[in-house]
Image (cartoon, rainbow, N blue to C red):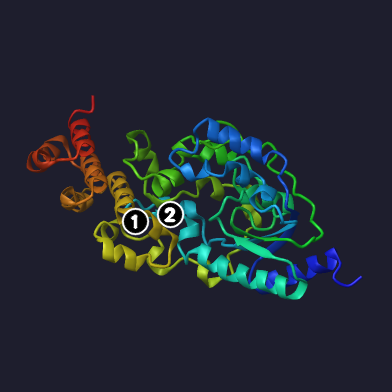
Amino acid sequence: MPNSTSDIREAVRERALAEGFDVVRIARAQSTADAAERLGAFLEQGRHGTMEWLEKNAARRADPAALWPEARSVVVVGANYGPDHDPLDDLNDRTSGAISVYARGDDYHDVMKTRLKRLAGFMVEKFGGEAKIFVDTAPVLEKPLAQEAGLGWQGKHTNLVSREFGSWLFLGSVFTTLEIEADAAETDHCGACHACLDVCPTRAFPAPYQLDARRCISYLTIEYKGHIPREFRDAIANRIYGCDDCLAVCPWNKFAQVSRAAQFLARAELRRPRLADLARLDDAAFRALFHDSPIKRTGRDRFVRNVLIAIGNSGEPRLAGEAERLLSDSSPLVRAMAVWALSKLLDAQRFAAVAKRYRGGEVDAAVGEEWASALDPS
């Protein structure tokens, strides 16, 4: 029979691969087994921190049918962004910053959207129906959907793991009113391994398959807009945007492949960038450097806040001058972390001398508390 659901599936799969996606599977547009329950528990326990957007439309987020009742099938695609080296190696040079693998190239939202629009257009033109695309910007639980479609499974660190690509898949989806034959769901292959739980510097996993985002370095350096709590700063080390530790240690990465998409490979300027250079970014320079990068959404102040934590953890007194210069920055976020960085790099006598010059003019209460805590840690 022409245009049977299996015929449509194969045509869509072929076109998706031609568009540059590395894997494509089909899921039914219905709630996954325990997605709503897991999301509800996560929100109820407050483990989403300040990410209020996760609370909005929680019912629609957990159930594709609630998001778009007319949808019948979901085409779930993955794009491999595998790095060309072990990202854990980037933690060894404390005078440079470690940036999460996903953010070293072009913004994947833009790359994926362009491809998905072409795929959705092909589907509507060839088979009819309606289609909507989603890339991490709408209330869609992409990882449970990806597991249901057979791309991989949610590991004990709650991220997707693929037997073919390891930890490194960007996800996107096309919701369609077409009935398309679904693929079989993937099963869990973590076994007794708990390497991802053990490696976490801030102990962000209360139990296997559970994440407390409030303790997660990715959340703290990307999503969190405030003064990062002191208890996590040492553990952040030189991670200035995100953290890949739980992804990088996964044994399934032995099957991972370097991305074939040039857009996802690290730019030269984002391979272990020097902290001294990043500390000197003003708003215009920040926007110029990250104009088509996902890093741009943090804004300059939060990013430099992260850089100063890394400077404080560098153990390199020569970077103290960069931190001292930022004691006069217009942003309280930056000034507070400049205080902390200096307290880590200078001996008590030199730090007290700097405090004498700058502390008296401070007007922000949080920065004032940072001075007081640094001068009297007890």
Front-most of residues 283 and 275: 283
Badge 2 crowding class, 10 Å Cα cut-off, few under 14, some 14 to 19, many 20 or more, is some
Badge 2 element: helix
Q: Nearer the viewer, residue 194 or 69?
A: 69
- Find disc 2 in the rendering and name its residue: 90
Query: Could you tell me residue 89's position as x and y percent?
Result: 46, 53
Q: Earlier in the sequence, mark 2 or mark 1?
A: 2
In the foreground, 327 or 121: 121
Give me the residue at 68% from left, 42% from top.
190
How far from the left and from the top, in percent, is residue 146? 68, 52
The picture quadrant where one finds residue 369 is top left
Dividing the picture into quadrants, the one containing residue 350 is top left
In the rendered structure, which amino acid carries the disc numbered 2? Asp
Mark 1 highlights which residue?
Answer: 299
Q: Which residue extends farthest top?
A: 378
Residue 274 in sight here:
yes
Q: Position of residue 114 (x, y in %)?
A: 57, 70
Residue that sits furthest to the front in the current view: 70
Quadrant location, the C terminus: top left
Please tell me whether mark 2 or mark 1 is closer to you in this view: 1
Q: Amino acid at mark 1?
A: Gly
Image location of residue 204, percent across then percent down: 49, 36
Q: Secondary structure at mark 1?
A: helix
Q: Is residue 89 above or below residue 217?
A: below
